[in-house]
Amino acid sequence: NAVLRRFLRERDTLVAAAMHTPEGAFNHPAWWIERVRQDWPMQWSALLTAANRHPPMVLRVNARRLSAVACAQRLAEHGHAARVIGPQAVLLAQPCPVSELPGFAEGEVSVQDLHAQRAALLLLGLDPSAGARPALPAGARVLDACAAPGGKTAHLLELGDYDVTAIDADAHRLLRVKDTLARRQL
């Protein structure tokens, strides 16, 4: 209690002092700040500042049920500004609870970072920047190790008929994969 009371009395002074340290200014541990500074001497400050920004809310549209364009239109009808940014990717202008997303409970959309969505596209040879690789044939066997919570497993199954085995070292987290696939009706 004494520590908290002192902080309340001296808040401005203590916060100002903390902000003059690298850890306080960048909200990262000293070892990480030093590592980023060594690896990126010209950009380290901007990188650490950017790492503290809230990430955008990106949705992945279930390709078996809906197009990204149709999803963005439906979101707009429900008061959520959004734009298509990838084959199954829709960026929301403002994050919101998933319970407000039309189609979330029915498995039509999921929250998944744009870069995480690239994994399935690259594996299947569907990404335009991947070059001239052949697409993975239907029925191909795929192992998704460290699969929880199941986003990439679901994405693969949405894009084609593959024999996907999802494993994870944590049995409790593996239950989330089952939940994800059930919600997506896969």
Image (tube, rainbow, N blue to C red):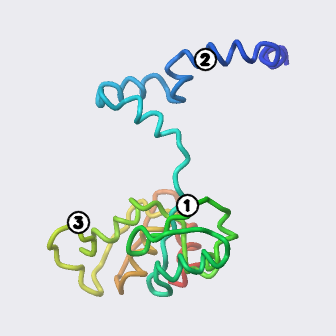
**Viewer-nearest of discs 1 and 3:** 3
* Amino acid under disc 1: Arg
Looking at the image, tell me whether mark 2 or mark 1 is earlier in sequence order: 2
Residue at the (16%, 69%) spot, across then down: 131
Residue 35, horizontal then vertical, whole percent: 35, 27
What residue is at 59 percent from the left and 68 percent from the top? Answer: 81
**Which element is circle 1 on?**
helix
Residue 44 x %, y %: 37, 30
Mark-to-mark CA distance, 2 and 1: 37 Å
Task: Count up the numbered dots.
Answer: 3
Q: Disc 1 designates what residue?
A: 173
Residue where numbered disc 2 is placed: 18
Alpha carbon separation for disc pair 2 and 3: 44 Å
Residue 121 % position (x, y) = 32, 71
Disc on the earlier residue, 2 or 3 = 2
Q: Residues within 10 Å of mark 3 (few under 14, many from 20)?
A: few
Q: For this view, does 68 lie left or right of residue 126?
A: right
Specify whether 34 is left or right of 23. Answer: left
Does the image show residue 182? Answer: no
SS of the residue under disc 3: helix
Task: Answer few, some or many: residues within 10 Å of disc 1's Cα (few below 14, many 20 plus, some between 14 and 19).
Answer: some
Disc 1 vs disc 3: Cβ atoms closer than 8 Å? Answer: no
| Residue under the point 54% across and 59% down | 57
Mark 2 falls on what kind of element? helix
